[in-house]
Image: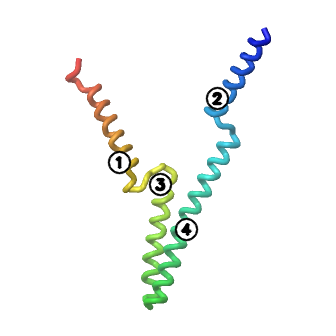
Amino acid sequence: MREQNHDLKGRIAAARAEEKEEHPSRREKVMENTNLGVRVGTELAAAIIVGGVLGYALDIWLGTEPILFMGLLFLGIITGFVNVYRVVYGMRPLGDPARLRLRSDVTASRRDDDDKNSPDQE
């Protein structure tokens, strides 16, 4: 009887641990969302600041007062929003092989779905 009780306690503990892994707590979800928000803000601010500072420095060095500042600031804003999009939607950089694999997997699954729904098969 004692052995059965010990075995039951072990199975309950394993089930609780498995449930905890599958269903993160509310605090973990809040922390994950907070981390995402901080990262998005940092990506956007860093790109804009780098573009503005670089444009300002080049303008002073080359004597083309507002032109490079405005251009690189605008480029920094665009870059910041592209980075935010990548962070939020989990995009990978263009040269990343995993991106190509993912795209080919999606294309293959679409072809499979099209084959299943084609009227030729009966």
User: Counting other residues with Cα less than 10 Å from the Cα at mark 2, is it few (<14), some (14-19), or many (20 or more)?
Assistant: few
Depth order, front residue of 14/22: 14
Which residue position holds label 2?
Answer: 18
Which residue position holds label 3?
Answer: 86
- Give the residue furthest to the top: 1
Look at discs 3 and 2 and give the one toward the viewer: 2
The image quarter in which residue 120 lies: top left
Three-letter residue code for mark 3: Arg
Q: Is residue 94 left or right of residue 34?
A: left
The correct choice, above or below, for 96 with respect to 115 in the image is below
Identify the element where label 2 is drawn.
helix
- Give the residue furthest to the front: 3
The image quarter in which residue 67 lies: bottom left
Three-letter residue code for mark 2: Glu
User: Counting other residues with Cα less than 10 Å from the Cα at mark 3, is it few (<14), some (14-19), or many (20 or more)?
Assistant: some
Identify the element where label 4 is drawn.
helix
Depth order, front residue of 74/104: 104
Q: CA distance from mark 3 to mark 4?
A: 15 Å
Q: CA distance from mark 2 to mark 1?
A: 33 Å
| Residue visible at 51% across and 57% down in the picture | 84
| Residue visible at 61% across and 32% down in the picture | 22
Three-letter residue code for mark 4: Ala
| Residue 2 percent across, percent down from the top left | 79, 12
Look at discs 4 and 2 and give the one toward the viewer: 2
- Give the residue furthest to the left: 120
Which residue position holds label 4?
Answer: 46
Instruction: Name the colouring of the figure.
Output: rainbow
- Give the residue furthest to the right: 2
